[in-house]
Image (spheres, rainbow, N blue to C red):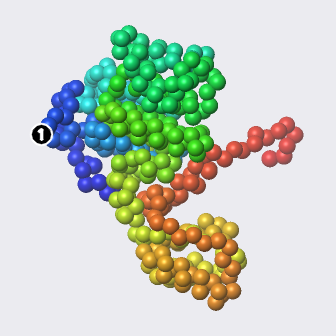
Amino acid sequence: MISDPNLGNSGSAGRPAAGGGPSTGEPAVNAIEVEHIVKKYGDFTAVDDVSFYVKEEEIFGLLGPNGAGKSTLIRMMTTLIPITSGKARIVGFDVQKDPDDVRRAIGVIPQALTSDIDLTVEENLNIYAKLYDVSAQKRKAAVDELLELVDLTKWRDAQTKTLSGGMRRRLEIARGLVHSPRIFFLDEPTTGLDPVSRVAVWEMLTNIKAHRKLTILITTHYMDEADRLCDRIAIVDHGKLVALDTPAALKASVPGSNVIEAHFDHPTADWEQRLHALTGVTSVQHEGAGMYRILTSDGSKATTELVEMAVRAGVGVKSLSVQNTTLDDVFVHYTGRQLRDELVKSYSFVMPPRPGMQP
Ligand SMILES: Nc1ncnc2c1ncn2[C@@H]1O[C@H](COP(=O)(O)OP(=O)(O)OP(=O)(O)O)[C@@H](O)[C@H]1O
Ligand SMILES: [Mg+2]
């Protein structure tokens, strides 16, 4: 299932010396190494025997639905919670044996916003810089540079409570970088942001990467985000790693290169079987209410046949789209479920019963 041949490579070859960095001629070193890591809460296994490595200067994504174990993985890698079993090394430092060295090497943006809303933008950055012992003379230059990088220079004296959600995220990202960490962990940095602010955060992260020598580990449940930003993606589901590779290789690993989404008016009872018979079709998913998602190796031929078949059968086609395979299809392929459905389910809200209401 796991498509990265190096995933299980837990040997010591290529492991960096503590605190060491790459130099000319040396083999590429791993910024993060996670080996058979497990987290149990009582009888519940939140992270179940996960192994992966992240190369220096890579942008690595953990993609999975709510409750997959993404934050738990980050918390273990960043020394915030104990590891039940297995190992994690950050730039060569063992998370359990050398937590202080790990903390000095990393910047962490947790899932919840944590900047102080009663301070100004600049004060929030300065407090962190002082906490991390950045000298006074370096502090000013670091704060100026970071404000510029996250496009908040003209807001430096604004109270944090006056910022929009996207601007506050950008402030938190700047704050996580004041001590020039080598590894940057971001837990769902764009959840809750509008599409424009999300793109702004992506651009900013790409910009930061271009200016600094930085390895980034990001968690997300947005497939487009993982696709756009990450060099490699690990798909996690129910605490397990189900696939790991580059976005392109993950998409190529799904049989069928095109996805047809079609909405039919009163399809026949055997419609799903008939769709299966079209050219190159490798899977058909009925999403309810006449909506079908069809994977095929020949999008154009299958679409023509589909329309002809619908005309012959007197079935109306309300909408039709043909696209290349997405990470959504990859998720379905490896887990049997749709990431979108999982998110909708997790966010659905059930009204609490009101007094006098019948169950
Ligand atoms: N302190 C805890 N005690 C018990 N169970 C926990 C604890 N923290 C997390 N869990 C459970 O572990 C599982 C993984 O949670 P985690 O927060 O890592 O998921 P996630 O992938 O980050 O999800 P989300 O996208 O919602 O942030 C969930 O089922 C969660 O309920
Ligand atoms: Mg989380």
**Position of residue 346 in the picture relative to residue 146 (left or right):** right
**Residue 111 shows up from this direction:** yes
Image quarter of residue 132: top left
Does 351 sit above or below residue 101? below
Q: Position of residue 270 (x, y in %)?
A: 61, 81
* Outermost right residue: 356
**Residue corresponding to mark 1:** 25
Task: Give the residue drawn at x 22%, y 47%.
Answer: 9
| SS label for mark 1 | loop
Q: Give the farthest residue toward the top.
A: 136
Q: Quadrant of residue 93?
A: top left
Q: Is residue 72 visible?
A: no
Residue 3 at x, y = what percent?
32, 57
Outermost residue, left side: 25
User: Furthest residue to the bottom?
Assistant: 312
Amino acid carrying label 1: it is Gly
Give the x, y percent position of residue 105. 31, 25
Left or right: 220, with 32 as reference point: right
Residue in the image at 56% along x and 29% along y: 168
Q: Give x and y (percent) for residue 336.
A: 48, 61
Q: Nearer the viewer, residue 40 or 10?
A: 10
Q: Is residue 271 above or below residue 344?
A: below
Query: In the picture shown, does residue 248 fall above or below 14?
Result: below
For residue 34, side relative to residue 159 (left or right): left
Q: Where is the N terminus found, in terms of image quarters? A: bottom left
